[in-house]
Amino acid sequence: MTPPICVASKRKSKSRKKRVPLWFAMCSIVAILVVVFVSQGNGSGGAWLADTLRAVAGPTITARAESWYLNFMNTASQVQYQMGNKKVSAPWSGAQVTPSPSPTRPAWSTLSPMTLTSMTPLVSPALTGEGTWTTLDQAPRPYNYLPLDAKAYIRPDPSHPYAIVTMLQFDSRFTSLHIVGGTAEPGGPRGMRGPGVIPVTDQQGHALLATFNGGFKYRDGHYGLMSGGTVYVPPVSGVATIAITKEGKLILGAWGVDPQLNSQNADLVAWRQNAALLIDKGVINSLTQDGAAWGGTVLNSAYTWRSAIGITAGGTFIYAAGNALTAETLGVAMKSAGVVMGMQTDINPFWVRAFLYNRDRNGQLQVNKLHSEMQGTGYEYLNGTARDFFYLTRFAPTIPPANGK
């Protein structure tokens, strides 16, 4: 017969064994939430923590934790705004120095300036300068009587009046888009590593105009990328794709749906894919709230930093990025700027970034962020980065282009 003391001891031991997995699970959840909190607000160290968490806990658990955190912070921001403690201000000062165009257009020119569609503010009262494009640079000589690029901002969501989308618009007649594979991303089974840096020739003189973030990592959708004749990740059928032809023409559409976007088109020299089309022929994708349509992640319905690229009916190229956005509200902002074909690129505070480059009178490179809250310095693309990215160079065609081409 087993003594009563031994029976009680065994019961306590079993009880402790049952509690250990529970405590372990609770501690794991707390640890995950702490890592997510740190990763969302602490630059490169936070990004490293988030990547480590994905490797340990898995992408699904990490994404759900990030979604919970982002929704919590969004609710906190809404409460703060409603209490009057969250001030909404323009992302830049209204006092801007606009480059002076040539006083007269050359007699040989038949070109019109690129169309800068004025955007009607969607939140009332509007902020100073909201919806209005400001010219930044003039096209290279002899086309310097035309604007080369411009910036603007708009708030697309009345329920989130502090969500601001900043935009850059470029005249594609005088700019060339380039895609660069990072030293680690997009990754993929082929193990192909990119240079992760802008070529020295494009860094010299006044060629370099802008850089901005690429798309998701390989594990977040297996989206394709080709650049410089190298296929880093094979294309995925039906996915939103930005492609560049040998002539420098930009094509934005769904792979295998647009007749020009396929592996048999030898005219394509580079392309990058990312999720579903955000805007297709001027219509915002009706599945913007469906996670499966955007890479199968719960983060697609979360309010966070997001970015996108698009092409307008006039052929201009647009980059857009902002905070406290869903895929849908980002689409609303892009459409208001005249985008007819658009795709979302990367998301989350650390990865969304855009920079403009110019040289001063002494030839020193000047780098400016599109939005002061964006991470990075802009020099990572000059010295080397692990992530893929886009960059734009300016050029003067020897044969005058036609309007919109």
Image: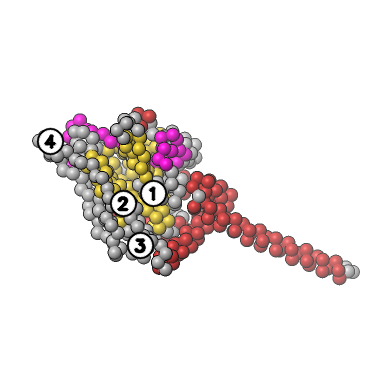
Badge 4, how many Cα within 10 Å: few under 14, some, many 20+?
few
Q: Residues within 10 Å of mark 3 (few under 14, many from 20)?
A: many
| Residue at image mark 4 | 106
Quarter of the image with the N terminus is: bottom right
Give the mark, 2 or 1, whose residue is nearer the N terminus: 2
User: What is the spatial separation of the Cα atoms under label 1 and label 4, in whole angstroms?
Assistant: 38 Å
Q: Nearer the viewer, mark 1 or mark 4?
A: 1
Dot placed on the residue nearer the N-terminal end, 1 or 3:
3
Q: What separation in Å lies between label 3 and label 4 (alpha carbons)?
A: 45 Å
Q: Which amino acid type corresponds to the residue marked 1 in the rendered image?
A: Ser
| Residue corresponding to mark 1 | 372
Choose the circle earlier in sequence order: 1 or 4. Answer: 4
143 with respect to 386 (left or right): left
Describe the colour scheme in one phrase.
secondary structure
Q: Secondary structure at mark 1?
A: loop
Q: Say above or below: 206 vs 236.
A: above
Residue where numbered disc 3 is placed? 161
Is residue 232 something that shows in the picture? no
**Residue receiving disc 2:** 93
Nearer the observer: mark 4 or 2; the answer is: 2
What's the amino acid at mark 3?
Pro
